[in-house]
Image (cartoon, rainbow, N blue to C red):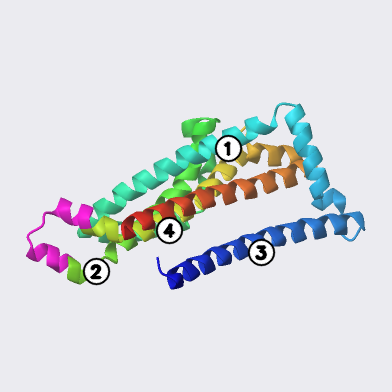
Amino acid sequence: MSPEQKKFIKKIKINKIKIWLCQILIIILFLGMWEFFVNKGIISSFIYSSPSRIIKTVIELINNHNFFIHIFVTLKEVIIAFILGITLGFIIALILYEFKFLAKVMDPFLTMLNSLPKVALGPLIIIICGANSKSVIVMALLINLIVSIITIYNGFLCTDEYRLKLFKTMKASKIQTLTMLVIPSSYQTIIASFKLCVAQTLIGVIMGEFLVSKQGLGYLIVYGKQVFNLNYIMTGIVILALISYILYKLIVLLENKLLKHLRD
């Protein structure tokens, strides 16, 4: 490796460290200002809670053996709904890509379903699936599936036309074209759909837990509202933010490994 290359790589690493430090600094400043404003009475501690009260609430939940149960239930529902949404979205997007007539027929219905407020279907979902985790997963699936289909399908449509013509000239089969051209050229779009899907899934799970759950972070927030303990609500929100960040980072890690594999 030449000195210029080493210098360039070192510069990239230093830039990543700077970004990481800035992100940590923003979080520390936000938490510090939040605690300061509450202690000085600038904002209401009853309504907005505070970082110290959230820590006390977490300790209380751990002592009551509820903390990890709520996190586990929500994570389980998120993972199941995410896997189902991505898998079904990928398969349906492939079908629509291969059958253009079907795609044109379904286009307005996909748009209509995507714009429909899914919470309006909540009572129907509960009647069909029951007041349990199934309803929560179905609610999340209804929210993330359409987004996954549309995103992945549009990624397939953006495949380079000249490369498609080249594959046709070489008399490649449809399966070869899909597996060797269309899908690989859409990797970045598929990863982008992962990011959208995980966010939509988390929203759907919390909405479902608001309606039917007896455990989970959504239930913790609802319970905090019912007993008028806003510390529970803020604790649930902060934990959800942390889970969202961790899931996002995992997808970014997957994206980096995938892109590195493609470059190699």
The quadrant the C terminus occupies is bottom left
In front of the other: 44 or 33: 33
Q: CA distance from mark 4 to mark 3?
A: 24 Å
- The image shows residue 117, relative to residue 219, as above or below, that is below
Callout 1 amino acid? Thr
Q: In the image, is residue 32 part of the stretch drawn in magenta?
A: no
| Count of all numbered marks drawn on residues in the image | 4
Q: Which mark is residue 74?
A: 1
Q: Earlier in the sequence, mark 3 or mark 1?
A: 3
Instruction: Name the mark on residue 160.
Output: 2
Q: Amino acid at mark 3?
A: Cys
What's the magenta region?
164-180
Give the mark nearer the N terminus: 4 vs 1: 1
Mark 4: which secondary structure?
helix
Q: Rounded to the nearest whole Å, what is the CA distance between mark 4 and mark 1?
A: 23 Å
Q: Earlier in the sequence, mark 1 or mark 2?
A: 1
- Which residue in the protein does label 3 denote? 22
